[in-house]
Amino acid sequence: MKISLRDRELVDEARRLIRRRYEPDRHHVAAAVRTRSGRVFTALHLDTYVGRCSICAEAAAVARAATEGDRELDTIVAVRFRGRGQPRVVSPCGACRELLADYGDPLIIYSNNGGLHKARASRLLPAKYSRPEEPR
Ligand SMILES: [Zn+2]
């Protein structure tokens, strides 16, 4: 799926946030999610010494949108910054793909082979975990 001007603006929102709030060993990833209402919510990831305790920026951005009662997610992106250069779009981790597929299956802007692409979370997570007795 092609990347639109609005998608590039979403990437820029995430880049602006991580440039502003970057802190080594604390915050080096930011996400921006656009909801169907057109609002954009941004968030940082929370890094920890014990990796599994960390909170991904995508999850934090979805939580911010849900907190505001704006839960219909349209498109999301995350970028990683190393303190210099251009923050780069990163692909969501497996846990975030699960989360996003559960929360409306938004489009994800991700990088692959040096280019930006866009696909639904469910497309990036074939054979997703499910509980057939409790369909979403
Ligand atoms: Zn993640």
Image (cartoon, rainbow, N blue to C red):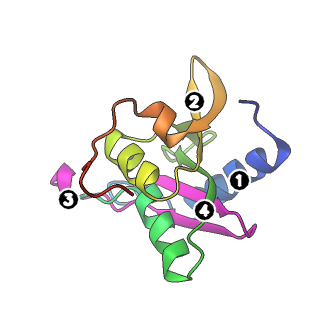
Q: Is residue 129 magenta?
A: no
User: Which residue is depicted at the point 47% across and 32% down?
Assistant: 124
Q: Secondary structure at mark 2?
A: strand
User: Which residue is depicted at the point 50% across and 44% down?
Assistant: 80
Circle 2: is it few (<14), some (14-19), or many (20+) Cα within 10 Å?
Answer: some
- Residue located beneath label 2 in the image: 111
First along the sequence among labels 4 and 3: 4
Q: CA distance from mark 4 to mark 2?
A: 19 Å
Circle 4: is it few (<14), some (14-19), or many (20+) Cα within 10 Å?
Answer: some
Which image quadrant is residue 88 in?
top right
Q: CA distance from mark 4 to mark 1?
A: 11 Å
In the depicted structure, whether residue 66 falls above or below residue 3:
below
Mark number displayed over residue 10? 1
Depth check, mark 4 against mark 2: the one in front is: 2
- Residue located beneath label 3 in the image: 53
- Residue located beneath label 4 in the image: 17
Circle 3: is it few (<14), some (14-19), or many (20+) Cα within 10 Å?
Answer: few
Q: CA distance from mark 2 to mark 3?
A: 25 Å
Q: CA distance from mark 1 to mark 3?
A: 27 Å
The image position of residue 70, as x and y in percent, is 60, 75
Q: CA distance from mark 2 to mark 1?
A: 14 Å
Q: Secondary structure at mark 1?
A: helix
Q: Quadrant of the C terminus?
A: bottom left
Q: Is residue 40 magenta?
A: yes
First along the sequence among labels 2 and 1: 1
The image position of residue 38, as x and y in percent, is 75, 67
Circle 1: is it few (<14), some (14-19), or many (20+) Cα within 10 Å?
Answer: many
